[in-house]
């Protein structure tokens, strides 16, 4: 896990003159009349005789979002360099959003790769966002490189905000660090290649995390799954020599006020099975267990933050491969709980393993259910690479979508139109796993899952097919590969439930 050492420091000219940091990070804004300096940069500006904005403008800086410009201090500060990072334009009310601070902090951390020690003033605007953005922006995954290359940013001191109590600032630093570390747990799992991360090895990693954090752990192997009737998980995993698993990891906090079930899709590699995928970009299917990684990281986070909740993660794990033992289009699977499903497409496998896990989670009578999965290509068609589709019971769906937006992970509430249910009718079974057309595929998948949710349960399905894995260039605090979405969303929802029920 690559997380810089993070600490609080004063934000004053005296503190800057004493810091041993190699680089001081300040924020810049894109104003109507050109670049301006953001809050927290006053002491740095004073060291430049109030002319730092002019210096940066001369170098071509504009303050646009994620722009980075380095300026030598020439002895004006004990640090050798000032890194100015753009926050973009303030809102219409003049407010700089937490996500602007998060992305600027991430961009600064990426620009400071190879730097031993930095001092960030972005925390004067939003401490929590600055810490999260810095920790996530500094993330690199080098486990499989023979030569690791440039070391990531290793230590950051954050300027203490001018307002608020010191103990509150320390609590904010701790919470933001723990949240970022949990996102990185998920990123590490997603970025691990499928020859090393398969159902049994994922379960073993989950066991180690559970034991390290005092959590309950249970795993059902293929024999137990068969004995108990988990037809969806067994069907999907039948084509692989690496047998499926169902993992349960549970946390019960002090004076738990609510029970939340978490379910995450854990297809450790998805070839599409008999309905095989095109070869182009099939390597991205190493990320098809992103939902499983997110819920595992989230239950660990709940324990670390000591939420007054009971949080139980149910993680169905399988590898979807073509072979002589694979399930076929035309098969009928008997799901856990008794429903039957006709398989029309073996590449619509995620909903099958999730259905089994959702029914199992419902047996424990949770107050809420959050399920997340890299479920449909239709999510990317509808919402793009960065915005998750959130479906479910209306009230809780909107609550989860709002949390996704507030954390910067992005999520949009989507409907579950009743007219699509008939398209899942099967000639043989209770329902089919796909419709016979391409329209509303993300919504139809949500409707399929709804069939397995206990009546009356507040639930949300978060389709992260795009947001879970960045196939393009780095941006903000997001590098290439696994993103860890929606760990921060789940954390925000858990905190909301802990506070408001």
Image (spheres, rainbow, N blue to C red):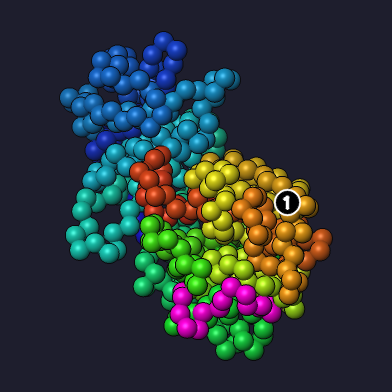
Secondary structure mainly formed by the magenta segment: loop
Question: Magenta stretch containing residue 470, yes or no?
Answer: no
Residue at image position (55%, 85%) is: 222
Q: Nearer the viewer, residue 17 or 52?
A: 52
Residue at image position (77%, 52%) is: 419
Q: Nearer the viewer, residue 426 or 289?
A: 426
Q: Position of residue 274 (x, y in %)?
A: 50, 72
Camera sees residue 161: no
Q: How many marks?
A: 1
Query: Quick check: 168 above or below 293?
Result: above
The answer to which quarter of the image holds residue 39 is top left
Residue at image position (74%, 71%) is: 427
Residue denoted by label 1: 416
Q: Which residues are magenta?
A: 320-336
> Outermost residue, top direction?
33
Query: Quick check: 201 above or below 409?
Result: below
Q: Position of residue 43 (x, y in %)?
A: 35, 23
Q: Is residue 337 left or right of residue 304?
A: right
Q: Is residue 180 left or right of residue 83?
A: right
- Disc 1 on helix, strand or loop? loop
Quadrant showing the N terminus: bottom left
Q: Is residue 427 left or right of residue 18?
A: right
**10 Å neighbourhood of mark 1: few (<14), some, or many (≥20)?**
many
Camera sees residue 281: yes
Residue at image position (51%, 79%) is: 326
Q: Is residue 57 left or right of residue 409?
A: left
């Amino acid at each position: 896990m690559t997380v810089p050492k993070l600490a609080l420091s004063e934000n004053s000219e005296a503190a800057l003159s004493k810091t041993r940091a190699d680089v001081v990070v300040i924020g810049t804004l894109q104003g109507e009349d050109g670049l301006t300096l953001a809050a927290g940069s006053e002491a740095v500006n004073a060291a430049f005789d109030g002319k730092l904005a002019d210096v940066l403008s001369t170098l071509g800086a504009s303050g646009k979002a994620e722009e980075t410009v380095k300026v030598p201090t020439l002895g004006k500060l004990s640090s050798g360099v000032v890194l100015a990072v753009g926050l973009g334009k303030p809102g219409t009310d003049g407010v700089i959003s937490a996500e602007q601070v998060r992305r600027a902090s991430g961009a600064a951390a990426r620009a400071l790769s190879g730097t031993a020690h930095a001092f960030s003033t972005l925390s004067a605007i939003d401490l929590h966002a600055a810490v999260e953005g810095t920790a996530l922006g500094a993330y690199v995954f080098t486990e499989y490189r023979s030569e690791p290359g440039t070391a990531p940013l290793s230590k950051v001191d954050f300027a203490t905000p001018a307002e608020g109590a010191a103990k509150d600032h320390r609590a904010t630093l701790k919470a933001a660090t723990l949240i970022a570390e949990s996102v990185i747990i998920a990123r590490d799992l997603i970025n691990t290649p499928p020859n090393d991360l398969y159902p049994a090895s994922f379960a073993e990693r989950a066991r180690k995390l559970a034991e390290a954090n005092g959590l309950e752990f249970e795993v059902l192997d293929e024999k137990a799954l068969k004995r108990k009737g988990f037809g969806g998980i067994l069907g999907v995993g039948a084509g692989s020599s690496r047998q499926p698993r169902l993992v349960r990891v549970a946390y019960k906090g002090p004076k738990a006020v609510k029970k939340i079930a978490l379910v995450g899709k854990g297809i450790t590699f998805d070839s599409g099975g008999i309905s095989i995928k095109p070869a182009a970009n099939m390597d991205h299917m190493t990320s098809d267990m992103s939902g499983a990684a997110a819920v595992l990281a989230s239950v660990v986070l709940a324990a670390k933050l000591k939420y007054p909740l009971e949080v139980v993660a149910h993680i169905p794990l399988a590898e979807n491969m073509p072979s002589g033992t694979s399930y076929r289009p035309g098969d009928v699977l008997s799901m856990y709980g008794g429903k039957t499903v006709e398989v029309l497409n073996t590449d619509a496998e995620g909903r099958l393993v999730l259905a089994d896990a959702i029914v199992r989670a419902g047996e424990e009578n949770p107050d809420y259910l959050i399920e997340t999965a890299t479920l449909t290509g239709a999510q990317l068609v509808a919402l793009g690479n960065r915005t998750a589709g959130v479906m479910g019971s209306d009230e809780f769906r909107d609550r989860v979508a709002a949390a996704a937006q507030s954390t910067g992970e992005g999520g949009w509430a989507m409907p579950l139109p009743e007219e699509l249910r008939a398209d899942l009718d099967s000639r043989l079974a209770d329902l089919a796993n796909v419709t016979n057309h391409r329209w509303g595929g993300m919504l139809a998948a949500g409707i399929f899952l709804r069939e397995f949710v206990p009546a009356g349960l507040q639930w949300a399905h978060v389709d992260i097919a795009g947001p879970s894995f960045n196939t393009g260039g780095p941006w903000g605090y997001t590098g290439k590969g696994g993103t860890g979405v929606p760990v921060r969303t789940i954390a925000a929802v858990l905190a909301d439930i802990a506070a408001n029920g």
